[in-house]
Image (cartoon, grey):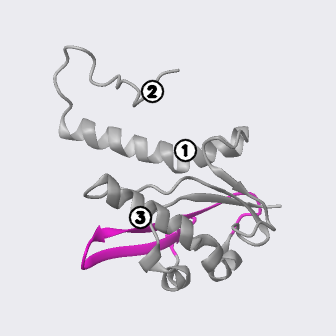
Amino acid sequence: MATGRPRSLWPPSGAAPPTAWETVARDAAGLWARSAGACLLELLYEHEELADHRGPDDEHGVPGWRSISSGALAYGLSDQENLRLQNALVEADVLREIADTFTADLESVWFNGVRVFYGGVPGAMEAEVRVNGEQHAGATAAAPWTRSAPASPTLSPT
């Protein structure tokens, strides 16, 4: 079994270093793959390897809804700070805590997306909750921002 990070396939051997746009595009694709992409693959294939599955009665889920949540993603000044932010989100159980503020606004009986964003630098933090791509003022106001970090779950009722 291989250990460590997989070898990057970009740039190919002997190629020029990536441009700023190539780096941004690669980073954006990687972020999507580890968040919304992981939820989409779990929704389609249900392997329970890329994201967490919670039932409608699960104590850490959204009451009345099946949820698929990717891992908490954090990018900061250090790996230690990233891990602290990731653990804070998991411990805060943000979706469960704010569920009553947004479940009435879930439009589809099949699939809905809820994203929790938290980031910035000390003294200039930004935070919001988006439901189906739109900022949700009630959920944003209710979230325990001092204990959270980015996540991206997909919800569907049972």
| Disc 2 secondary structure class | loop
> Dot 1: what SS?
helix
Q: What residue is shown with label 3?
A: 85
Relative placement, left or right, of 105 versus 94 is right
Question: Which numbered disc, 2 or 3, marks the residue that appears first in the sequence?
Answer: 2
Depth check, front residue: 153 or 19? 153
Q: Quadrant of the C terminus?
A: bottom right
Residue on which disc 1 sits: 37
Which residue is pictured at 79% across the width and 66% down the height?
56
Queried whether the magenta region covers residue 131, the answer comes back as: yes
The image shows residue 19 at horizontal and vertical percentages of: 18, 34
**Of tags 2 and 3, which is closer to the observer?**
2
Q: Please give the range of residues in magenta.
A: 107-135
Q: Nearer the viewer, residue 55 or 108?
A: 55
- Assign the magenta stretch its main secondary structure: strand
Residue at image position (32%, 40%) is: 25
Residue 27, located in which quarter of the rendered image?
A: top left
Which residue in the structure is indicated by mark 2?
3
Q: Is residue 145 left or right of residue 138?
A: left
